[in-house]
Image (cartoon, rainbow, N blue to C red):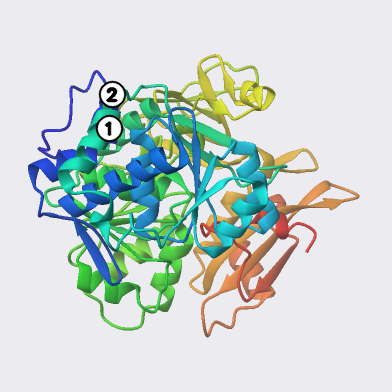
Amino acid sequence: MTSNPALIDAESSVYPVAEVVGLPHARARTNPHEPCLSWLGGSFDNAEFASAVAATTHILRSRFGIGRGSVVGVLLRNVPEIITTMFATWSLGAGLTPINPALTDDEVVFQLDDSGCALLVGDSRAEALARGRGIGCLPVTDGCFHGDIGTHGDMEHCTGVSSHCLDDVRDDDVALIVYTSGTTGKPKGCVLEQSNIAAMVWSILNGLNFGENARSLLVLPLFHCNGLLAGTVSPLMLGGSVHMIPKFDPESFWDVVEEERPTYFSAVPTIFSILEATTTRDVDASSLRFVICGAAPMSPDAITRFQTRFDVDMVEGYGLSECSVCATINRNDGTSKPGTVGPALPGVSVGITDPHDRLLEPGDVGEVVIAGRTVMRGYLGRSEATAEVLKNGWLHTGDVGYLDEDGFLVLVDRIKDLIIRGGENIYPKEIEDALFEHPQVLEAAVVGSPDDIYGEIPVAHVALREGAAACEEDLLAFLEPRLARYKLPTEINIHAVLPKNSVGKIVKGQLRGS
């Protein structure tokens, strides 16, 4: 376990929120010239980062009246302004709602209106959208960002501004309003309080051994909790540093790793599969102590191929925005179990329930439920939706799984993805994992299709590796000895690529009926 002195007694399961919110200024006081945040073409040491945060805080409060209860939106690709704005917003008792730049204008406007956003930080597009909604806009070219940092006062003055605000930070201040993907209707805003953030970062840092001088390569977009908390706040709390890239690019990815020497990065299965399939040269991945895989289950075969190819351990975790990002993770201490997503993180409880909300014994399959200080306050303005998922002290995830005898979670599938064929339950993930065993399969997704006789039948969709020549008949023949007959897909459709959302998760809704 890391010797970082910031870690507190395990019984508390949370940092004091002022330690998280005041992190930029604590780092500046302790090691002002140590590296903090870098990106293509620029960097902040600790003092520069604290100054940028403090100057942003000053502008938010004095020019736009941002204070406790306000919501600030950011509509940007991965750039340092998101991180400086986040800490500045927090120091004022306000909340941040990060917005996916890939959304349409109508979708952005929905999030602005639904969150009650008072100010939007972003580029020229953000300015036009903010003007149309009658809210303020802080353009990224303003002097408080990475250029002319000292415009709004020297370091002592700016630090004083933010330090004054930190005295009044509360556990129940809204920290983040993160929107779900909206696959079953309009997106819902998960309200995460400062105590949720503090608890989540504490759990991450007590659940993994990051070692000394941790350096995160920020690959995932910053409109989700993974990039913000696992990729940014956590290494900064350890006294480490972060290098951010604007987006994942497999052609330049390993060049960045070799130049920036990160000790870890967190990504989704699609990214790992693409790297394993497309990397043709020898790469130097020796700086990586481990990599984190999350957002969607990854097949054991795909994990083994990546680890073997690049000689780096992968720790697979599980969580969702409603519990601040992560609930379980396989440890990087030799205790991980392939095929599982690990045991619960410190300070988090994970259980399995039946349809009557009764907790089940190890080995019994049911709905995965989560409890702990990382669980959200609720969905913003949606009391009925909140009541559906927060019941009897548990967050009901909608995921199906079981706990083994050692408390390691095995994910079976999503409840809504269950296929019932003639009364037999079929979990698509089992078929997908079998497809991934085929050496020519890069991506796989199985969905249910209506059938007059059986009610529903499984249909598979795959993308093959470059140069692969497998056909539907080849893949069906490969599956026959691996699956019971009723689980075999009735058809296998081969695509160039499978549809994905902005994080890289396969969107099954677009495959149903195709």
* Residues at marks 2 and 1, CA–CA distance in whole angstroms: 6 Å
Q: How many marks?
A: 2
Circle 2 sits on which residue?
Answer: 13
Q: Quadrant of residue 255?
A: bottom left
Counting from the top left corner in percent of width and height, residue 182 is at 66, 45
Counting from the top left corner in percent of width and height, residue 102 is at 58, 61
Callout 2 touching callout 1 (CB < 8 Å): yes
Counting from the top left corner in percent of width and height, residue 195 is at 36, 25
Viewer-side residue, 197 vs 34: 34
Circle 1 sits on which residue?
Answer: 202
What kind of residue is marked 2?
A: Ser
- At a point 80% along the width and 59% down the height, the residue shown is 513
Q: Taking 461 as reference, is 290 left or right?
A: left
Q: Secondary structure at mark 2?
A: loop
- At a point 54% along the width and 40% down the height, the residue shown is 118
Viewer-side residue, 39 vs 266: 39
What kind of residue is marked 1?
A: Trp
